[in-house]
Image: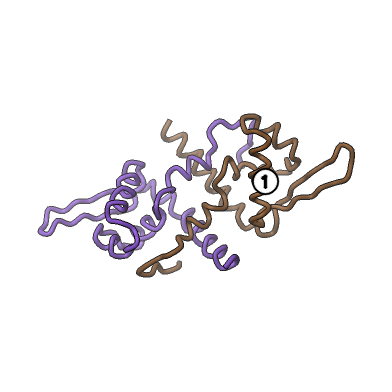
Chain colours: A brown, B purple
Amino acid sequence: MEEIGQTEFICPSDTFLGIIKGKCKTTLIVLIKKGRNRYGEMCRTLPTISPRMISKQLDELERDGIIERHSFAELPPRVEYTLSDYGETLYPIIREIRKWGYMHQARTK
Amino acid sequence: MEEIGQTEFICPSDTFLGIIKGKCKTTLIVLIKKGRNRYGEMCRTLPTISPRMISKQLDELERDGIIERHSFAELPPRVEYTLSDYGETLYPIIREIRKWGYMHQARTK
């Protein structure tokens, strides 16, 4: 594994966390990966999060190159998201994070 | 993998992030894992972080059951930390997070 030098100016974990922090961003990534990838569908799946907040998270994930937005000129308009190739490299880590999170929830409740 | 229900009240990622967020906590975990586990040594390795902040992070990691503190009644007093068995379950994920973080730093700089 990488060596830690005497000083570490930009913590790589902070870099990672900068990408996935944000209201249930990892849940959105999982939904997209599992094919629940339409905007409206995600809003219905996460009713405790406002559609505006979900939009914001999706925009950030798109900006960071993790997901791709596909807009279809239909009536009603359809917007779907997919993981980018880069997002696919993030996904296995998110899966492990979520698994650990569930375990910790069970352990501490 | 786990199913995402209609609602998800406590996001498992947030649970995970709650444990590792904090000023370079993952770096401390890596240092401990690699045997740079004395308090003074960690302070010297991370000169940009105040010893007080390092203490705080270590206390939180101990409280969360991730690390164990061993105090030796010597002169000068010696304090060492080790990963707990539970902390060991976290470690592979942190390694992947850091690896991804380094990759993302290289990609975006």
Q: Which residue is drawn at 70% across and 37% down?
A: A42
Residue B64 in the image: state x and y as whole percent: 36, 42
The correct choice, above or below, for B30 with respect to A46 in the image is: below
Residue appearing at x 73%, y 53% in the figure = A68
Residue A105 or B20: which is nearer the viewer? B20
Q: Is residue A87 left or right of residue A19?
A: right
* Image position, residue A14 (x, y; %): 48, 55
Q: In this view, does A65 lie to the left or right of A17?
A: right
- The residue sitting at 26% across, 63% down in the picture is B41
Q: Name the residue under label 1.
A: A58
Q: Position of residue B32 (x, y in %)?
A: 33, 58
Q: How many marks?
A: 1
Task: Give the residue type that dot 1 points to.
Answer: Leu
**Which corner quadrant holds the N terminus of chain A?**
bottom left
Q: Is residue B92 rendered to the left or right of residue B73?
A: right
**Secondary element at image label 1:** helix
Where in the figure is residue B59, as x and y percent of width and height?
30, 46
| Badge 1 density bin: few <14, some 14–19, many ≥20, Cα 10 Å | many
> In which quadrant of the rendered image does the C terminus of chain A lie?
top left
